[in-house]
Image (cartoon, rainbow, N blue to C red):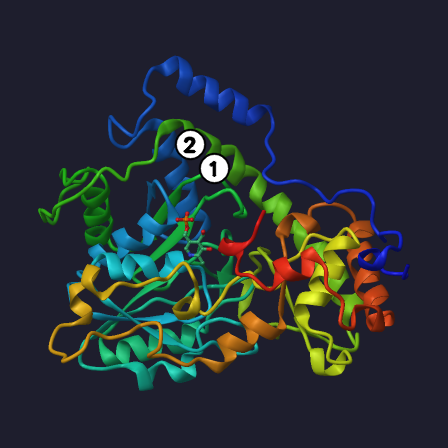
């Protein structure tokens, strides 16, 4: 029996961390309001709760317009339609992100072009975008990942130089600000998710924000079965679908948004404390702070684990040990999308991959993004944002558990354990 919980010792942390999502009476009241209103769906369009929420959500992110949709994936898809992405167009995407960033590009029969991430932020590396641009490139789709922003200053400069559109994937960035501008308001459109794990949630849902009335109108038509938008100034008609958000879900978003600033402040305070405990910890690195992030969106907290400085104990063993000490965390949280088991692209389904070529593009083997692969398979450790919703003691327990494992690394050498085996699998392939 060792000292570490994974080798039979007592776990450092026995109490559970705060759960997620949270709700109060406010959600019960708004849900009841919908229930008794008989207007449960997204029609009449837009619904009362959806409209009221969208207005506040746009304001928080310094955008003129916001439209609720039924998922974050659809928010990206609708944004691609709004900027006029057509079959065969190319869209630059980061290699390290959730598959839902990239799927919509294929769905509109465009071609995703993966670009590596900046190791300082784990976000799309702006320095590498230009070499991926071809005459077919029409847009850049940066993701503000974890708790950092992609370098929007540089991305907007590149977009202007090459006449490209920009869609910000803000699934992790609710409430975040860059140089005083809200996440999603700097590009042509910003796409948010309200799926259960997000900083604010209604179970499943999403929103698109923009400063352009034309795009706002097109998004409305696209998600409302092609009907004219509420303002219909641009008189554009496109095929649309029912991607509306129901009113029960919209009703939850109001109270979630009201609590976001307080909850984010708690998370940020605890993250700073955790950071101070992690400074100068051997084998652990932090993502670089950026003064241009003027309001933090404290989603997943990401640290780097350097096995080479930890007696070559692989990350899977370290993370599994940390989990058994009672700390929720994950190593293989994201993979480079082109390597993920959730990206089994069949070129027969996406004709643009074959156009003008002898052989269809094989998106799974075409790209090599070493920084994304290093983050995914060796270095990144993600802590869910709710770990930071409690008190300083909780964050101390996380830091203490990390130190405990680093002091007892030899117990992990050659160890086989179901939690370690599980950590070697991508999220979609795990048992639980
Ligand atoms: C970075 C990123 N982009 C897009 C999405 C898609 O959002 P949804 O799951 O709501 O479709 C998610 C979340 O799941 C995400 O984390």
The residue drawn where x is 11% and y is 77% is 356
Q: Which label's residue is closer to the chain start, 2 or 1? A: 1
The residue lying at 57 percent from left, 77 percent from top is 120
Q: Which residue does the image show at 35% across and 30% down from the upper left? A: 246
The quarter holding residue 363 reads bottom left
Which of the pair 11/420 is nearer the observer? 420
In the image: residue 79, left or right of residue 419: left
Q: Is residue 268 visible to the viewer in this orientation of the structure?
A: yes
Q: Would you place residue 259 above or below residue 96 in this image?
A: above
Residue 90 coordinates in the image, percent (x, y):
23, 72
CA separation, marks 2 and 1?
7 Å
Name the front one of labels 2 and 1.
1
Q: What residue did someone put label 2 on?
A: 249
- As rendered, which of 14 and 192 lies closer to the eye? 14
Q: In the image, is 222 to the left or to the right of 324?
A: left
In the rendered image, the residue lying farthest to the bottom is 131
Q: Position of residue 94 (x, y in %)?
A: 41, 71
Front position in the image: 313 or 373: 313
CB atoms of marks 2 and 1 within 8 Å? yes
Quarter of the image containing the N terminus? bottom right
Dividing the picture into quadrants, the one containing residue 273 is bottom right
- In percent of width and height, residue 26 lies at 55, 26
Q: Which residue is mark 1?
A: 203
Using the image, determine if residue 302 lies above or below residue 298. below
264 w.r.t. 154: above or below = above
Label 1 Cα crowd, 10 Å radius (few <14 / some 14-19 / many 20+): some
């Amino acid at each position: 029996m060792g000292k570490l919980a994974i080798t039979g010792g007592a776990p450092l942390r026995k109490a559970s961390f705060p759960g997620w999502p949270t709700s109060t009476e406010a959600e019960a009241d708004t849900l009841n309001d919908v229930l008794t209103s008989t207007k449960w769906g997204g029609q009449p369009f837009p619904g009362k709760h959806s409209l009221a929420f969208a207005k506040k959500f746009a304001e928080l992110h310094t955008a003129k317009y916001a439209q609720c949709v039924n998922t974050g994936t659809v928010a990206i898809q609708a944004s691609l339609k709004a900027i006029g992405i057509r079959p065969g167009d190319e869209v630059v995407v980061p290699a390290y992100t959730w598959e839902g960033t990239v799927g919509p590009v294929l769905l509109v029969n465009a071609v995703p072009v993966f670009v590596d991430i900046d190791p300082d932020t784990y976000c799309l590396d702006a320095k590498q975008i230009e070499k991926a641009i071809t005459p077919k490139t029409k847009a850049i789709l940066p993701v503000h990942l974890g708790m950092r922003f992609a370098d929007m200053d540089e991305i907007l400069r590149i977009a202007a130089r090459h006449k490209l559109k920009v869609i910000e994937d803000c699934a992790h960035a609710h409430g975040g600000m860059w140089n005083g501008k809200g996440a999603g308001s700097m590009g042509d459109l910003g796409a948010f998710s309200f799926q259960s794990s997000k900083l604010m949630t209604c179970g499943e849902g999403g929103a698109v924000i923009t400063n352009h009335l034309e795009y706002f109108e097109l998004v409305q038509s696209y998600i409302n079965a092609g009907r004219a938008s509420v303002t219909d100034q641009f008189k554009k008609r496109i095929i649309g679908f029912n991607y509306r958000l129901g009113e029960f879900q919209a009703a939850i978003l109001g109270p979630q948004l009201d609590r976001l600033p307080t909850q984010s402040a708690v998370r940020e305070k605890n993250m700073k404390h955790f950071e101070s405990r992690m400074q100068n910890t051997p084998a652990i690195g932090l993502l670089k702070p950026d003064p241009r992030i003027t309001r933090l969106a404290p989603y997943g907290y990401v640290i780097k684990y350097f096995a080479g400085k930890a007696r070559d104990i692989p990350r899977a063993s370290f993370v599994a040990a940390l989990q058994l000490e009672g700390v929720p965390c994950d190593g293989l949280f994201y993979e480079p999308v082109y390597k993920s088991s959730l990206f089994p692209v069949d070129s027969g389904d996406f004709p643009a991959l074959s156009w003008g070529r002898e052989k269809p593009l094989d998106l799974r083997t075409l790209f090599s993004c070493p920084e994304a692969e290093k983050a995914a398979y060796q270095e990144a450790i993600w802590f869910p944002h709710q770990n930071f919703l409690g008190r300083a003691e909780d964050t101390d327990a996380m830091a203490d558990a990390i130190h405990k494992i680093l002091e007892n690394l030899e117990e992990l050498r050659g160890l086989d354990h179901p939690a370690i085996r599980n950590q070697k699998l991508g999220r979609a392939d795990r048992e639980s």
